[in-house]
Image (cartoon, rainbow, N blue to C red):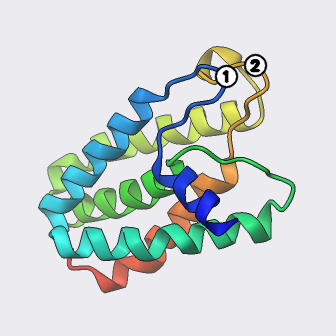
Amino acid sequence: LLKNVFSGMVSPLKINGYPGEKWTLTLLLLLGLAEKLFGSLVVFSITGLAAPLLSLGFLLLTPDMYHYRGASALGSLWATLCAWSLWCNFSRFRPLLLFLLLLAVVQSLAVAFAWWSPLSSLPEGVYSAWQAHVMGMILGVATMRYVKN
């Protein structure tokens, strides 16, 4: 079971023909930025430790979820860490980071609670796992003290 959950977290979203390339590309771009900010060893170590922890979080928080085929939890973790590092080291990016945070929150809430369907690119019958975003952000915040900023 854990093997299936873990492989689903690191593979692109492929449900009902939805390829998910843009989300895979987003995660790869975040990992590239994280590698520049923190180094390869940190990115490898945190990703390797976070994936099983996030899988266990899914099992505990959403026991009725049978399939999770995204990488949004890892994306949220790395977005949190990268934004924090940029915020600390490059004050000129702060307005842009606040704007992106606002957009991410609005889009996540709209998709999670089905307020406005044009904001979602998920096919019929596939829903956002908002728990993944929250767990990723919490793990990102918890990890901040262990990485250089």
Q: Is residue 28 left or right of residue 65?
A: left
Q: Amino acid at mark 1?
A: Asn
In the image shown, does 139 or 110 lie closer to the viewer?
139
Q: Which residue is denoted by mark 1 in the rendering?
A: 16
Q: Which residue is denoted by mark 2 in the rendering?
A: 124
Extreme residue in the bottom direction = 146
Nearer to us of marks 1 and 2 is 1
Extreme residue in the right direction = 64
Question: Which quadrant of the figure contains the C terminus?
Answer: bottom left
First in sequence: mark 1 vs mark 2: 1
In the image shown, does 102 or 47 lie closer to the viewer?
47
Residue 3's spot in the image, x, y percent? 59, 64
Q: Residues within 10 Å of mark 1 (few under 14, many from 20)?
A: few
Residue 69's spot in the image, x, y percent? 60, 44
Whether residue 89 is visible to the viewer of this picture, yes or no, is: no
Q: Is residue 149 above or below residue 58?
A: below
In the image shown, does 38 or 64 lie closer to the viewer?
64
Residue 90's spot in the image, x, y percent? 15, 57
In contact (CB < 8 Å): disc 1 and disc 2: yes
Say which residue appears at 55% left-offset and 61% top-offset: 6
Q: Is residue 45 left or right of residue 37?
A: right
Whether residue 128 is visible to the viewer of this picture, yes or no, is: yes
Residue 64's spot in the image, x, y percent? 87, 55
In the image shown, does 27 or 133 lie closer to the viewer?
27
Question: Which quadrant of the figure contains the N terminus?
Answer: bottom right
Say which residue appears at 58% left-offset and 67% top-offset: 54
